[in-house]
Image (cartoon, grey):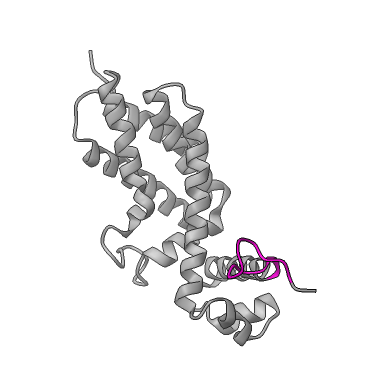
């Protein structure tokens, strides 16, 4: 019996799709526990219980596989945030929902946070971006800037440069998460509440 294919004759079979998902999950696990440099194709193959040749059949290089892992993490991250933004009842509430969602997702998905930091930051203590601006993968802060602009147009938020403020809020979120990764005893729920207050103080109209 010929394995069923997803979409069209050239699409991967369902079995191949399942194998690709398994390899991506193994890659995420390894990067989050061992770091990017130690996540070799051989290690991924061993974790998945397949040969290195089988890994290369689905992904022609380590770079292709690790990029697929990062793409999956970022897609799930964006989906989580987008879902919570859709529930917001107004521009102000949308900004608060964004801050809360950014913290909430990372709190619940620590291994995904490790993948993001391992893939986007350098190896010198994880403090510098490999590629300047790469932290804005998928337009993360542009999305926040758009929310802020909508709030300004609605007359809910004060006048300011939306891009600059979005980067400042994003940097504050990243700073809290970076500290939490090193100091897991940090109360992220309390930190999220402080970040919400910080954000509202920065953007709301003043009497």
Q: Is residue 53 above or below residue 137?
A: below
Q: Does the magenta stretch include residue 10?
A: yes
Q: What stretch is highlighted in magenta?
A: 3-15
Question: Looking at the magenta stretch, what is its main secondary structure?
Answer: loop
Residue 5 horizontal side relative to residue 123, left or right: right
Q: Which of 109 and 52 is in front in this view?
A: 52
The residue lying at 24 percent from left, 36 percent from top is 162
Q: In which quarter of the image is residue 43?
A: bottom right
Q: Nearer the viewer, residue 204 or 136?
A: 136
Q: In this view, does 65 lie above or below 196?
A: below
- Quarter in which the C terminus is drawn: top left
Does any portion of residue 183 appear in the rendered image?
Answer: no
Residue closest to the far top: 207
Q: Is residue 71 above or below residue 88?
A: below
The residue lying at 32 percent from left, 59 percent from top is 134
Q: In which quarter of the image is residue 110?
A: bottom right
Marks counted in the figure total: 0
Residue 205 horizontal side relative to residue 43, left or right: left
Tell me where residue 180 appears, x and y as whole percent: 47, 51
- Quarter in which the N terminus is drawn: bottom right
Q: Which of 179 and 105 is in front in this view?
A: 105
The residue lying at 68 percent from left, 81 percent from top is 50
Q: Does the magenta stretch include residue 150?
A: no
Tell me where residue 197 appears, x and y as whole percent: 37, 28
Q: Is residue 154 above or below residue 62?
A: above
Tell me where residue 94 appears, x and y as whole percent: 41, 29
Does any portion of residue 162 appear in the rendered image?
Answer: yes
């Amino acid at each position: 019996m010929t394995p069923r294919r997803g979409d069209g004759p050239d699409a991967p079979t369902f079995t191949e799709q399942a194998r690709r998902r398994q390899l991506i999950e193994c890659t995420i696990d390894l990067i989050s526990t061992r770091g990017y440099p130690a996540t070799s194709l051989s290690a991924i193959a061993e974790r998945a219980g397949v040969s290195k040749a089988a890994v290369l059949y689905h992904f022609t290089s380590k770079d292709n596989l690790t990029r697929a892992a990062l793409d999956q993490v970022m897609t799930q991250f964006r989906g989580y945030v987008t879902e919570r933004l859709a529930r917001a009842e107004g521009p102000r509430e949308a900004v608060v929902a964004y801050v809360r969602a950014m913290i909430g997702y990372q709190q619940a998905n620590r291994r995904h946070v490790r993948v993001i930091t391992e893939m986007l930051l350098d190896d010198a203590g994880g403090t510098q971006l490999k590629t300047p601006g790469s932290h804005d993968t998928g337009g993360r802060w542009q999305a926040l800037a758009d929310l802020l602009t909508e709030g300004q147009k609605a007359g809910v938020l004060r006048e300011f440069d939306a891009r600059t403020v979005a980067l400042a809020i994003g940097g504050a979120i990243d700073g809290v998460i970076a500290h939490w990764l090193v100091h897991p005893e940090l109360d992220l729920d309390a930190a999220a509440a402080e970040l919400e207050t910080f954000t509202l103080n920065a953007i709301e109209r003043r009497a």
